[in-house]
Amino acid sequence: MTDLLAKHSFVELGARQRAKALLDAGSYRELIDPFQRVMSPWLSRQGVVPQADDGVVIVKGSIDGKPVVVAAIEGNFQGGSLGEVGGAKIAGALELAAEDNRKGIPTRAVLLLETGGVRLQEANLGLAAIADIHAAIVDLRQYQPVIGVVAGSVGCFGGMSIAAGLCSYLVVTREARLGLNGPQVIEQEAGLEEYDSRDRPFIWSLTGGEQRFNSGLADRYVADDVAEIQQTVSALLQQDVPAEQRSRRVDYYLARLAELDAAPQIDPATVRALYQGERP
Amino acid sequence: MRGLHWFNALSAGAPPVAGLPNSLKVADGALGEHAVRFIAVVTDTHNRFPRARNGEVGLLEGWGLAKAVDEAIARGDKRPIIAIVDVPSQAYGRREEALGIHQALAAAADSYARARLAGHPVIGLLVGKAMSGAFLAHGYQANRLIALRDPGVMVHAMGKASAARVTLRSVEELEALAASVPPMAYDIESYASLGLLWETLSVSQIEQPTPQDLARVSDCLVGAIKDIDTPDLSGRLGATHRAASSHVRQLLREQW
Amino acid sequence: METLSFEFPAGQPPKGRALVGCVGSGDLEVLLEPGTPGTLTIQVQTSVNGAEQRWQHLFQRIFQEQTPPALNIDIHDFGATPGVVRLRLEQGFEEIGHD
């Protein structure tokens, strides 16, 4: 019975299985697969065991018969952190998808985001790769929707939360968290009173998938279910690019922030009330 | 204050663009024959968001940068955009996370990237710190990055104290390790070895530029504008310390 | 971190290859690929230092039960227990058998 249940949970799947679950049967083809052993050139020399795919799986295939590339981050390897190789895999795949579109091939992209952001052992190369990923999303988005999925359990943080904010559509579950700064780092920088990294209900109430969806910072809120996530991604891919990207709603968000009394410390209900008017 | 001083020197009295947060300095000035927009994030001790009062890139700054860049795009003249980078960090706070600082920074990155794709030469001029999310929002989408050679100019993903905590090391251990691993180092020479900078140059007074300093940097900026030949970030690839980034792209292309 | 090498007598190489596991806490990644007839080679990169004897004994126990196929095995270990190592190897052998 546990086997049967596990089959339906998306969160429990590894990156490779997640990518496979989204694609049309038989269309899965991995690029730079783990047997090619393109591994981090930086981890071993720092005494950290590398992974054969550097924690990023790039797969080409089709969804509803149309070409797609899926980039899936393995959250269990080094917290889903992005180093040089993994970051270049995602950026390079998105760059080639944009190139496809310029040649008339309508390749779309899906990003499965389980990541703490930059891998600190490769600090500046991770950061540079994430800037490349941002650039590539903005480029590809001119032609095709880029779908971000934050399913959990790692969540999506650091520079990759900015990538999530650049996606055409963002799908979250209850297990998901989405935020720029990890709770530990905020506590370190701003103090326990500002942010208690051990208070899990507090953190989920501010940055969890349900709150993000109810605040208009995510587009779909789904159950942790393989079929539901597959269908949601497929439906979003069939939509055109959004009329207005969330990351381009500058006047709207500046106006909302101008209305806010920023003096008192904030709570989740205030965020929902401030932002909820935007959901059509 | 470096960011402000370099902004004042470069913009040379051009009127500030109104309608933006006080933490942003934006002006349309000139570089040689080019009409350009200068943008800097500066300290605002009265910032409504208390965690963004020391020059951090927070909610207002992220959305405000997007607005400043979008306005330049809307003018339709493809004027160069110069991001003067002196940003100690993104804002770390409860309000920031709750209100979606990641989305505000995405807006800024989005606008800079679209400006670049639309044919605006975009230059990042690093005169101070260029840290993590703050740099991603303000400068890292530039076609060309230029850094001044100075111990106060540094690019990194995380401050030392936090990086030590997250990697379960002492600050001393982190510093020792960083000295032997170029991408982990905090100094600008190591960063330059990654191939991400188009140019580095020395000035005599980095805190308060002299007329000669200003002339050198202006010439370099003009040179960078002229050098831009593609709207993408491919000019950053090719250094031996970033060989894997090129290798991965080559393999992807072969297997695509 | 340590890198260790092992070699055992083996049968014929299989046709396929397999990947199981992940370099996550208490887990390991195992890559199995066809090797030279008669020989099984194993390369282990492990976060736990000073455990060469334990790996040796574990592999001996597993392979004395049944002669393994000729494989080149790469292991990236992040502190897995002997039970998890055995489980992953068995999964790997099973996946290769299916090809």
Image: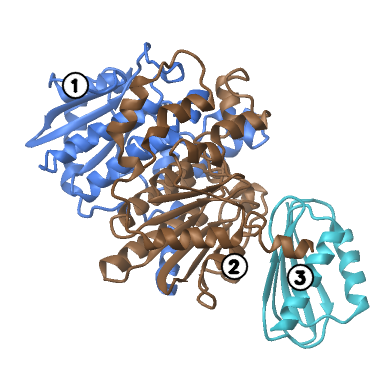
Chain colours: A brown, B blue, C cyan
Locate the C terminus of chain B and report the quarter of the image it occupies: bottom left
- Residue A161 image point, x, y percent: 47, 42
- Residue A214 image point, x, y percent: 49, 37
SS type, badge 3? strand
* Callout 3 and callout 1 share a chain: no
Pointer 2 local density, CA inside 10 Å: few below 14, some 14–19, many at least 20: some
Name the residue located 72 percent from the left edge and 79 percent from the top edge. C96
* Callout 1 and callout 2 share a chain: no
Q: Quadrant of residue A67?
A: bottom left
In this figure, what is the number of numbered marks?
3
Q: Is residue B123 left or right of residue A46?
A: left
SS type, badge 2? helix
Q: Chain of mark 1?
A: B
Q: Is residue B135 visible from the viewing direction of this image?
A: no
Locate the N terminus of chain B and report the quarter of the image it occupies: top left
Q: Chain of mark 3?
A: C
Name the residue located 68 percent from the left edge and 86 percent from the top edge. C15
Nearer the camera: disc 2 or disc 3:
2
- Residue B73 image point, x, y percent: 18, 40
Q: Which residue is mark 2?
A: A34
Q: Which residue is mark 1?
A: B18
Q: Is residue A221 visible from the viewing direction of this image?
A: yes
From this view, report whether residue A178 is shown above or below residue A202: below
Q: Which residue is mark 3?
A: C42
Closer to us: B135 or A186: A186
Three-letter amino acid code of the residue under disc 3: Ile
